[in-house]
Amino acid sequence: MSRVTDLSVSPVQEVLDAAHPCWLLLTQKTAYAMRLDESGRLQHLYWGERLGQPQDYPGIGRPLARYERDHLAMADDEYPAWGGFTYSEPCLKVTFANGTRDALLRYQSHRQEQQSTDLTTLIITLRDTDYPLEVDLFYTVIPEYDLLERRAVIRNTGEEALTIESALSACWQLPTLSSGSYRLTHLNGRWNSETQIERRALPTGRTILESRRGLTSAEANPFFAIDFQQGEYGGATEEQGQVWFGAVGWSGNWKISIDCQSYPTRVSIAGGINDFDWRWQLQPGEVFSTPPFVAGFTTSGLGSVSYSLHGYQLDYVLPRQHAQKPRPVLYNSCEAVHFALTEETQLELARRAARLGVELFVIDDGWFGQRNDLRSSLGDWSVNEHKFPRGLADFIARVHELGMQFGLWLEPEMVNPDSELYRAHPDWIYHFPARRGTLQREQWVLNLARDEVAEYIFHRIDSLLTTYAIAFIKWDFNRPLTEAGWPDELPEHQREVYVRHIHNFYTIVERLRARHPLVLWEVCASGGGRVDLGTLARFDQCWTSDNIDALDRLTVQEGYSLAYAAKTMAAWVSLPQKSEQASAFTPSLSYCFHAAMPGTLGLGDDLRSYTPAEMEEASELIATYKSIRHIVQDGLLYRLISPRHNACTAIQYVSRDQEEAVIFVFLQAAHFWDLAPAPRIFPRGLDPSGLYYLDGPLDEKGPISGQSLMSVGLTVPLTGHFASALITLTQAPAALTAD
Ligand code: DGJ
């Protein structure tokens, strides 16, 4: 039993001696409160700014006042289960063995676990009042990033199976509004234009963000941000305004369901695994664990949303082996030669890549089986001896001699009808009996829900990694699931495939990582179709988009940066003048490099077409990138000017110690010739009292104080179409600052 007196003591505060036991979860700047009502129902109370005293929160250690009851969110159940008056999106829907189709969850117990010195988890167990069902609600507090990571574990404590029809990870409740409105920001797109930012007033009713494709998808990303808009103007900016935001860590079918009721405006956001076409049989004694749904609140705008999610990914989510290490500059010839892979061309490209300073040489699609086009050999993961007559080991040795590491592309979850694997196991694909099925990209999806398929994939990749000195795997997934049937399985288990597939996908990668800890892993799904916190917990970086046009990349990368860290964002240089896209307004080589540098740099061009001058310029730009990549990959991001609705763009990264910064400035188009003003930028996040030297195409070289730079700003003398600049800021030594 404890009374809350000092909020600095622990991130999880309990008030157990009150009429209504309460919990207060505290981060550096935010608080989250809940309590038990008279019936033992776990009720949400508060999610917002951290307040001074425990009694400042509604209902903490005292009954709720009338005005506070009005403030409570819609259903105000922490984990709404289908039953009674629950008409908002339920987190849980079950059918018990006797056909009863609701759940009535009440408090059973709670405990705390210390994850590490930094992280505490509160676990509250709820139990059905009449049926053998328990639910553990996990709340992990991440104080420095003002985040809560929630998930649920559902347990069958009875002697008969029960059916789970929906099991979302968490439900978040926003403060009730009697005036003003909420606005939703989310990421949507399609192949070649992933992570586009969309912003709109949150409509009354239910808004569903989701994927039903069996993968995270390019069409929608499991991220939301909701800000508060008062009157005609306003809403959060990059630096100011209240924002509630979150992301689901799941790489299969997911759903974020936002219920918005009017008069007054009440909003709840439930999310996790999509319940569409999904069921799960929970046998006696079994548990079902949901993926995490992390969320946070800030009063400092959308920039702060990214700050929290990026820091969380770098410090807690990304696989620990490589989280602190710089990502190498890679070369991948996929866009340059497609399937026309030969040892000679690859060696020629490797020699050129090495001369540029590339650190990792990756062979993409086409190195295996009889793969000369899309139609054949997915599933047959053995080296094509025609293409590599001296063997892959010999080729890798040559890459090593050139001073680079070697990486390989795989698409393990797929099979072509024309393959040894399919001929041996035609029943290993998803299908419904008697249906022809939908072949896409000439390939089927393997039924990874089957453990023997997962085992086969694990052993094939394990054998490749054991046989060859492979330092990097690009794991691709190029078509969505269709006809997700598993005819050999009992009908009551058939709708489990979507989740079993992802469980086995995760397990294979985890097992391979444990056996080959030095390998770096990139996830890809026809571009950025598998970017989410679930893949980021198992992969070191993501392929962002197949679209490597420098201009298009600015908006793709801006959307990506809203939720995901630069270190995970693979970005290649590709010069349009080397392709059929060349036009009068073709960006320069430096523009293309600058557009790829705000992430993890790679190159995708046919380097054989680079002139000596282009080779020299590219190698200088790669050297520049290596000198600033620690700021980009581990620093703090500031989106100074958005490419959306502006003719110019500016992106800044600042090292955590504020000693260094880098700013990328792009002039997409110079309207009205020389009448167009040069971009004017206002750096952010600098040490106001520090003095900074400037390097870049500026008259001013400094030193200038951080305060002056941030308040007065800088004019970057860019003119013409597709002009760009890279500006570095380096803090002067302390002695100079003191003068
Ligand atoms: C789709 C990926 O996004 C590309 O980068 C490339 O790997 C191709 N697949 C290869 O088939």
Image (tube, rainbow, N blue to C red):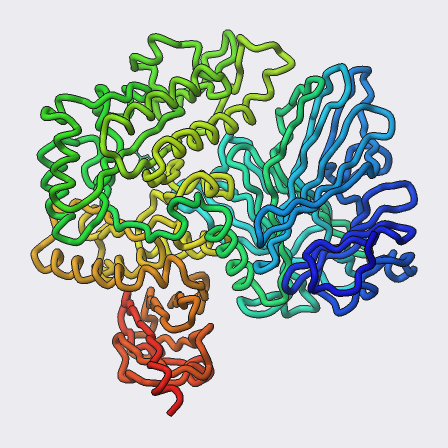
Q: Is residue 461 left or right of residue 7?
A: left
Which sits in the foreground, 684 or 216?
A: 684
Judge whether residue 658 can be spotted in this image: yes
Query: Where in the figure is residue 475, as x and y percent of width and height?
Result: 36, 34
Query: Where in the figure is residue 637, as x and y percent of width and height?
Result: 44, 63
Query: Where in the figure is residue 450, as x and y percent of width and height?
Result: 49, 16
The quadrant of the picture showing ligand 1 is top left
- Which quadrant of the figure has residue 199? bottom right
Q: Residue at point 33% right, 13% down?
A: 421
Which sits in the foreground, 608 or 364?
A: 364
Which sits in the foreground, 365 or 674?
A: 365
Query: Where in the figure is residue 441, as x and y percent of width and height?
Result: 35, 26
Q: Residue at point 35% right, 78% down?
A: 731
Which sits in the foreground, 615 or 702?
A: 702
* Quadrant occupied by the C terminus: bottom left
Residue 634, above or below 699: above
Q: Residue at point 16% right, 58% down?
A: 619
Residue 377, above or below 401: above
Q: Is residue 108 left or right of residue 686?
A: right
Q: Residue at point 42% right, 31% down?
A: 509
Judge whether residue 75 can be spotted in this image: no
